[in-house]
Amino acid sequence: MAVIGELIKKAIDFTGFIISDPDPVKAQKEVLQKLLETAKLTAFGKAYGFSEILESDDIIAAYQSKVPAHDYDKMHSEWWHYLLEGHQNVTWPGGQQYFALSSGTTSNSKSIPVTDDMLAAIRKAGISEITNINAFNLPGDFFTKQILMLGSSTALIQKDDHQEGEISGISASNLPTWFGGFYKPGKEIADIADWDERVKRIAEEAPKWDIGCISGIPAWVELMLKEIISHNNLKNIHEIWPNLMVYTTGGVAFEPYKKSLEQLFAHPLIYIDTYLASEGFIAIQKRPDTTSMALFPDNGIFYEFVPFDGDHVDEDGLVKPGAKVFSLADAEENVEYVLLISTVSGAWRYMIGDTVTITDKARAEIKITGRTKHFLNVVGSQLSVNQMNIGLRVIEQEYDVVIKEFIVAAVHRGDDYIHKWFLSCDKFPDNEKVAESLDKTLRENNKNYNVARGRALKGVETVLIPEEIFYKWSEETKKLGGQVKIPRVMKEEDFLEFAAFVDKNL
């Protein structure tokens, strides 16, 4: 088998990456032009004059001046609801076979169109991800091992003329035939809708597999690995999967989970970040000497960047009218931006809900820094998730604890506010001391937060709770596993409901 692996590895070396590395700026202009050409006769294209935009000397500037930014609610209420009703040629030519369901953290429930063109783009990006693993200098034998993809159920829901499911389930149900021999847990188990039952079956079948790579959201991968270890009476996962070498994560910050995950391994893995959202496959980590991810500049997505600050984004995390918007050509490195995308699924200048920084413009590399709705600015603190994570890593080091999940909100104390945090923790140091340390770090790293602390933001409280409470809440109020992410920032009303849930379950 090692010989076969070496042949596969050499074949990858010879053929190169499936998606090439073109000049990103040039490729992005060509992508936008192709998007506009393809959709110019749709209802959306006619409404916003795509034909006229294409005649402009600067199609990017013309596109940005004619088409407003859209969040999900605007895109759905004005356009996508027609697709759900069976209409065609609304925002992309033809009709819809799939809708990606997302409980999300920026909207209560979302139904996002997934066209055949988007599925083709996702497959192309996914193959690029697999072939790109060769850049991490893995042995030839690795390329004969299986890949465990822990996503949502592939048993899609039939609704009238289309099917619905989470994007990971839709993608897995459309895997190329040749990939079937490598893919685990396989269609039978992946079709199981109930998360607990699916993980139980994975644990039962795990000893029969030879897994070299795991892919999935860290919180749910960790729960799965713990179940496998418990069910099979193991000390660590490498006792049954000695060839496990790679973990591809994505969509959330991995660092909070790294310490606890590594307790389940006999040795650390190679960690590779990926960025697959309900709206498309956004980026992958291409190089071992960085944790940044490279955008796909020529694969059906046009990217735009809005400065993530109070001048351009309102308190609800929405782009303000008249906000400055930059294409990749004009955006700057090391500035936090709201990401907008236009895609082959008929999303136009769409707020995907994430914030990013460009770390290497020439390579079109980015890092996810947080979520637009996870921007705590009720009293002018302008506190992003990225800054929150930095503060929590300091707490972990100072108190030798592991904090993987958290939820924070600005809540009233009389006429003023405090920031109240619920933190998952494996140990339980003094809450007041933890709050003081967190407050001190945030003051030192965010001048707006420091100013707010001298005005309407009168205090900080932390409550340390077992991480299981977060997952139990997710299971009871949303659902467990798959693409589900724990929200980081809540409005006060929702936060108080979560606080009541915590009190009930402590």
Image (spheres, grey):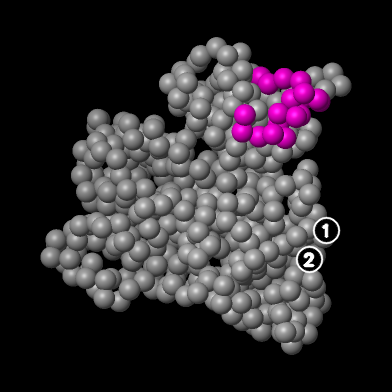
Name which residue type carries label 2: Pro
Do callouts 1 and 2 mark residues in contact (Cβ within 8 Å)?
yes
Judge from the rendering whether residue 263 lies leftward or rightward of residue 191; answer left or right: left
Judge from the rendering whether residue 470 lies leftward or rightward of residue 179; answer left or right: right
Q: Residue at x 21, y 38 (%)?
A: 239
Identify the image quadrant of the C terminus.
Answer: top right
Q: Is residue 135 visible?
A: yes
Name which residue type carries label 1: Pro
Identify the image quadrant of the N terminus.
Answer: bottom left
Residue 225 image position (x, y, % from top left): 35, 38
Image vertical order of residue 506 relative to residue 323, above or below? above
Q: Residue at x 68, y 80 (%)?
A: 36
Residue 377, quarter of the rendered image: top right
Residue 75, quarter of the rendered image: bottom right
Residue range in magenta is 444-463
- Kindly give the residue lying farthest to the right in the view shown: 415
Question: Which label lies toward us, 1 or 2?
Answer: 1
Q: Which residue is mark 2?
A: 68
Q: For mark 2, give the secondary structure.
A: loop
Label drawn at residue 321: 1
Q: Residue at x 80, y 19 (%)?
A: 413
